[in-house]
Image (cartoon, grey):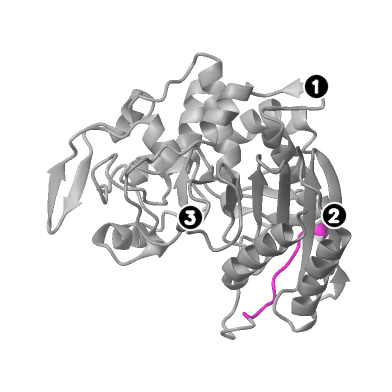
Amino acid sequence: MAARVNAKGIAKLRDALQSHIERGRIPGAVAVIARAGQVEFFEALGRMDPQSGAAMREDAIFRIYSMTKPIVSLAAVMLMEDGLLQMNQPLSLFLPEFANPKVQAGNQLVAARREATVHDLLRHTAGLTYGFLGSHPVQQMYEAKNLVDRGRTNREFCKLLATLPLQDQPGTWFQYSHATDVLGAIVEVVSGRTLGRFLRERIFEPLGMKDTAFNVHEAEQARVAQPFPKDPDTGEPVTMLDAKVQVPWESGGGGLFGTTQDYVRFVSMMANFGSLGGERLVSRKTVEWMTADHLGATPAYNDLLIPGYGFGLGFAVRKEAGMGPQPGSLGQYFWSGIGGTSFFVDPAEDIFALLMTQAPNQRIFFRNLFRHLVYAAVD
């Protein structure tokens, strides 16, 4: 039986967001709540561009950063349903540069006990990392090589990444990482198409996601939501992906731009177990599999995987009724982007919700606030 979302709770959520906008905590936001497949709240608040004063639009284009990962994870799983990819296949089968990997162990390199697999990429246990996450020697190497340079193709990125050691033995730790960037390169090799083209033909066009892409056309750039020029908490300049620059890197880990409306269609498809509007992308059992925990007892670095959650194939998955920082149901799944976008799906209550804003340093506060206020509106 689907949850009911009450008007009083929705009003409290709207008022809370509007209060933070008026206090200069975020420039603006688009918020969505849906139950039983029907959108019950979809509202644009505040400003789309704090410098020009332009009002937030429902069709504003956001940098969704790591909310790219669930989409690319789905692309890989679709290739599994095509019979072209398997979970236990090693990276070097598709990208030979990853053969014979080495692991940084203290001041020396040791041979990896095994290669990372497609499964490791999907659940972030490949031994890879992100340079910005810490000061480990491997993370310092990532920073020195400027792995996030958007001037490379996916294959060029992988060839550079493969020259660097792993931080951990594959399969031993959950470490949020460039794994989905590598997965995007595998999608290209297996499908024979660029990642952008594959996503467009197999996911975006079937779902009607007409404004989601790795580059924003010049005619649409006026719709790109902008952050404050300076962070309201620190006063430091805010730097985000420049939508005006057309780049070759179709980053599977964080390169997409898109609208709230488009991502609602993606989340609606997931919440509907693989289909939307007569278009079935994957089977019901595949969605159940993707949104189940794949870590088990595998430990996790840092706080990106919050208490009470495991990780599936592109999504964090709730395993505990308690522990988490907000209410929620077992089986709830979610992910977010470093720019301030987030979503969650709660199959037990048959609801999903999205918050889209561009406020990098405030993202965790507003993700937590939004989720708690959504559940406060559930009868």
Q: Is residue 94 above or below residue 152?
A: above
The crowding category of the residue bearing disc 1, from other C-alpha atoms within 10 Å (few below 14, some 14 to 19, many at least 20), is few
User: Mark 3 near mark 2, Cβ–Cβ under 8 Å?
Assistant: no
Please provide percent x and percent y for residue 127. 30, 45
Q: Residue furthest top?
A: 83
Query: Does 274 appear in magenta?
Result: no
Relative side of 17 to 372, left or right: right
Label located before the other in sequence (3 or 2): 2
Q: Considering the whole magenta stretch, tell me its main secondary structure.
A: loop
Relative side of 317 to 197, left or right: left
Q: What's the CA distance linking mark 2 and mark 1?
A: 23 Å
Circle count = 3
User: Mark 1 near mark 3, Cβ–Cβ under 8 Å?
Assistant: no
From the image, tell me which residue sits under label 1.
278
Q: Which SS class for mark 2?
A: strand
Say which quadrant the C terminus sits in: bottom right
Q: Which residues are magenta?
A: 223-231
Q: Is residue 131 above or below residue 101?
A: below
Task: Tell me which amino acid carries mark 2.
Answer: Phe
* Residue 248 visible to an observer of this rendering: no
Q: What's the CA distance linking mark 3 and mark 2?
A: 35 Å
Using the image, tell me which numbered label, if any, was put on residue 313.
none
In depth, the one of 364 and 226 nearer the eye is: 364
The crowding category of the residue bearing disc 3, from other C-alpha atoms within 10 Å (few below 14, some 14 to 19, many at least 20), is few
Task: Tell me which amino acid carries mark 1.
Answer: Gly
In depth, the one of 337 and 238 nearer the eye is: 337
From the image, tell me which residue sits under label 3.
149
In depth, the one of 268 and 60 nearer the eye is: 268
Say which quadrant the N terminus sits in: top right
From the image, tell me which residue sits under label 2.
42
Q: Residue at x 82, y 68 (%)?
A: 14
